[in-house]
């Protein structure tokens, strides 16, 4: 089964990992939002994933965000306007622990770690 197959769980794990990785690097680097360095707007997240040539479909992006929110890795500010989209994501301590390797989740795969 190819990782490009939408039903491949490895593909979903890669998408989740890349999203967490992007938000983690932004939070640990020069903060995009000095008032809340762990928060990233939808536009910035989408642009970062697009620059990496790893922007998933809207449905896959939302599914990955829902998973990460349910597990407590991210807090997602979902819009309440019927569009099903979001305004921003916020990295939590569990998300940091997951990326840094002190917490493990086989359903999230990181291609690189510090």
Image: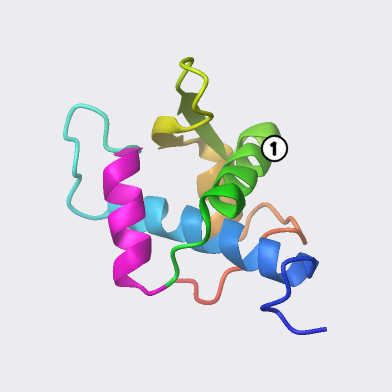
Q: Residue at x 57, y 43 (%)?
A: 62
Q: How is the image coloured?
A: rainbow
Instruction: Tell me how many marks there are.
Output: 1
Residue lying at the far right of the rendered structure: 1
Q: Residue at x 34, y 40 (%)?
A: 42
> Is 96 placed left or right of 88 in the picture?
right
Residue lying at the far top of the rendered structure: 80
Disc 1 secondary structure class: helix
Q: Residue at x 18, y 44 (%)?
A: 32
x and y, in percent, of residue 110 in the image = 57, 69
Query: Does residue 78 lie above or below 23 as drawn?
Result: above
Q: Which residue is mark 1?
A: 71
Query: Does residue 54 lie above or below 68 as drawn?
Result: below
Determine the main secondary structure of the stretch shown in magenta.
helix
> Is 83 placed left or right of 37 in the picture?
right
Can residue 95 be found in the magenta stretch?
A: no
In the image, 46 versus 105, the foreground residue is 46
In the image, 3 versus 114, the foreground residue is 3
Can residue 44 be found in the magenta stretch?
A: yes
Q: Which residues are magenta?
A: 40-53
- Where does the C terminus fall, quadrant-wise? bottom left
Report which quarter residue 95 is drawn in. top right
In the image, 21 versus 6, the foreground residue is 6
Q: Residue at x 77, y 61 (%)?
A: 106
- Where does the N terminus fall, quadrant-wise? bottom right
Q: Residues within 10 Å of mark 1 (few under 14, many from 20)?
A: few
x and y, in percent, of residue 107 in the image = 75, 58
Residue lying at the far front of the rendered structure: 82
Residue lying at the far bottom of the rendered structure: 2
Query: Does residue 21 lie above or below 4 as drawn?
Result: above
Report which quarter residue 12 is drawn in. bottom right
């Amino acid at each position: 089964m190819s990782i490009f197959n939408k039903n491949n769980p490895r593909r979903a794990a890669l998408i989740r990992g890349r999203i967490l990785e992007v938000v983690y690097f932004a939070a640990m680097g020069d903060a995009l939002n000095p008032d809340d360095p762990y928060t990233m707007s939808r536009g910035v997240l989408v642009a970062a994933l697009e620059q990496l040539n790893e922007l998933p479909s809207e449905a896959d992006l939302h599914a990955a965000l829902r998973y990460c929110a349910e597990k407590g890795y991210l807090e997602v500010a979902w819009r309440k306007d019927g569009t099903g989209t979001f305004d921003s994501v916020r990295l939590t301590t569990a998300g940091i622990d997951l990326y840094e390797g002190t917490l493990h989740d086989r359903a999230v795969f990181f291609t690189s770690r510090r």
